[in-house]
Amino acid sequence: MLSGLPDTPLQPRQRSCAPAWTLLGCGALGGVFASLLTLASQPTRVLLRDLHRPTLNPRFDFTSLEGNTQLLTVDRSFVTDPGEIARLLVMTKANQVLAALRPLVGVLSPDVPIVLLHNGMGIAEQVLALFPDNPIIAGVTSHGAIKAGHFVFRHTGKGETWLGPINEAAKAHAEIATDLAAAIGQAGWDEQIVVRQWQKLAINCAINPLTALYKLKNGELASPRFTDVLQQVCVEVADVMQAQGLAGTADELLRRVMMVIELTADNYSSMYQDLELGRDSEIEAITGFLLATAAQHGIAAPVNQGLYQAMKEKSPVL
Ligand code: KPL
């Protein structure tokens, strides 16, 4: 062997220093997922905006479902200098996804899977246009979370999480759901993720505007006062789903809505929290998407239209 040369062959360049997960979006749910992944010893990094450039890695003050609070040091980097990324989990609000991802166009390697976990629909297709070669995965989750301060996160409700492929390239990445399940308790892979997205859309169309407009906890929607409006919202969503060629009845959607109302009874919906904090809500990606799709099929959706309008004007409808 020639002196000075390594005696083992050089390995092809790997993403050796890339953590298993890079999270974009450190709101309530992003903070809780980053905490749970860190606690499960899955190397996790959060991508922060330069605006919030802390010198040190942030310390998350995380309270679990059981009420245990602990401080977790979470690795961080910045959107402008993200470092190696193995898989990107995007947990911003629906209305921030595209702006958050734009700086990564031309930076993100085309084989890096992008997982989108936000409320509402219609965003994944736009992400695909920005990153046409990357595996794009859409997800739905009904976990409850609260951001109670700067890097202070509370896990307030255990929900279901489902992921599934938006494009062909994503179909080979079911292991992402398995890894996620090891940290958050349950996460499934569903090739027909679009059906689950619509079921979640129905839940958000029903729960989010009403809780935000009437300043209620999710559980308060179980009152008979809301029975008719919840039912009507589900009838309209089911009509649009059927027009889209998807199976879904109003009764089934209503059953799911009532189940989430019960399971997250003590939670404030994300739209309630957005409105209270004066932030933009996800109404466009939720009810706005439903109304746009209904219009394409010539379907009237007056109850959802009323809730949409009320959210725009921030005044209750009942
Ligand atoms: O997704 C939610 C949200 O608040 O956005 C639900 C499931 C309604 C839980 O609050």
Image: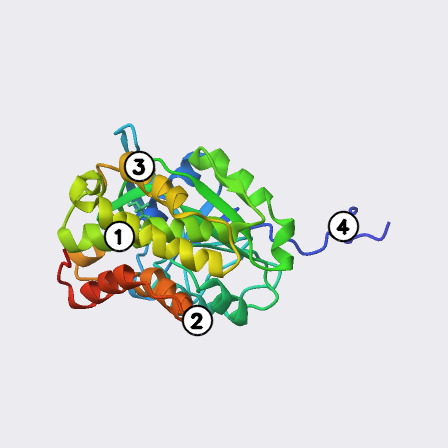
Residue position for label 4: 6
Residue behind label 3 places its C-beta within 8 angstroms of ligand 1: yes
Q: Earlier in the sequence, mark 1 or mark 4?
A: 4
Q: Position of residue 171 (x, y in %)?
A: 63, 52
Q: Earlier in the sequence, mark 2 or mark 4?
A: 4
Q: Earlier in the sequence, mark 4 or mark 3?
A: 4
Q: Residues within 10 Å of mark 3 (few under 14, many from 20)?
A: some
Q: Quadrant of residue 217?
A: top left
Q: How many angstroms separate mark 1 from mark 4 (CA)?
A: 61 Å
The label on residue 296 is 2
Q: How many angstroms separate mark 2 from mark 4 (CA)?
A: 64 Å
Residue at 45 percent across and 56 percent down: it is: 241
Q: How many angstroms separate mark 2 from mark 1 (CA)?
A: 24 Å
Q: How many angstroms separate mark 2 from mark 3 (CA)?
A: 36 Å
Front-most of 303 and 131?
303
Residue 101: tell me if it is visible.
yes
Front-most of 79 and 290?
290
Q: Earlier in the sequence, mark 3 or mark 1?
A: 3
**Kind of residue indicated by mark 3:** Gly
Q: Position of residue 165 (x, y in %)?
A: 57, 53
The label on residue 157 is 3
Residue behind label 1 places its C-beta within 8 angstroms of ligand 1: yes
The vertical placement of 112 against 148, above or below, is: below
**Kind of residue indicated by mark 1:** Asn
Residue position for label 1: 208
Q: Earlier in the sequence, mark 2 or mark 3?
A: 3
Q: Image quadrant for the C terminus?
A: bottom left
Relative horizontal placement of residue 2, taking residue 306 as reference (left or right): right
Q: Nearer the viewer, mark 2 or mark 1?
A: 2
Q: How many angstroms separate mark 4 from mark 3 (CA)?
A: 53 Å
